[in-house]
Image (cartoon, grey):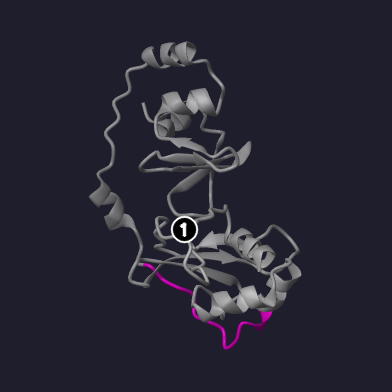
Amino acid sequence: MTAIEFLRRYRPNSLVKSSARGEYQLAQHDSFKINGESSVWHWKSRDIGGKSALKYLIYVEGVPFVEAVQLLCEESPMYIPVQHEAVERERPPFRLPNPAPNNDRVTRYLLGRGISLPTIRYCIARKILYESAEYHNCVFLGKDPQGVPKYAALRGIYDYGKPFKREAPGSQKQYGFCIPPMQPSTTVAVFEAAIDAMAEMTLCG
């Protein structure tokens, strides 16, 4: 049994739709994300992931291995996974927000978050960060090896209300925001959010 089928069948009240298309999170753990089609899940705060209901029960709900197996063996689910091609057909075309005439508001916001001006300018100059014309959100871009944008994370710059966080339609998660090194390097640092990466660059600068 896959994790998403288990959750839909036995934990329907725990599943909450996230801001990303086809993705859900747990009501009690908002850093837990699971794809509604592939069942691939990742618990960011604990850096664990999987796909099966067995692994979910063991690592998320803390059920002992033997008990988890016994629980699942009592069921005989008939689950036919969705073909990858079908998922791709449903993916909307990738669409980036239109850029604002300048990046002044995003710059002010990031400065207020403790990001240095050289770091902000470095990212803007490499076209991995810009300000959207509508709502003036931060737009963090992820590019493929050819430098073509394939992913965009949107982050609101206003402090009131619930923080706005969303991905642009059609974003492909395998292409994350990446700050290119200023000089040759053999080290890769991984962060949960784009602003975290910029903060690290600020500290190291």
In the rendered image, the quadrant that contains the N terminus is top left
In the rendered image, the quadrant that contains the C terminus is bottom right
- 66 in magenta: no
Span of residues in magenta: 94-105
Kindly identify the residue that appears in the image at 67 percent across and 67 percent down: 202
Residue flagged by tag 1: what amino acid is it?
A: Thr
Q: Quadrant of residue 40?
A: top left
Location of residue 200 in the rendering, given as x and y in whole percent from the top left corner: 64, 61
Location of residue 163 in the rendering, given as x and y in whole percent from the top left corner: 67, 59
**Residue 136 in view in this figure:** no
The answer to whether 105 appears left or right of 184 in the picture is right
Q: Main secondary structure of the magenta part?
A: loop
Location of residue 124 in the rendering, given as x and y in whole percent from the top left corner: 55, 78
Nearest the viewer among 16 and 144 is 144
Kindly identify the residue that appears in the image at 73 percent across and 66 percent down: 113
Instruction: Tell me the element at label 1.
Output: loop
Nearest the viewer among 59 and 76 is 59
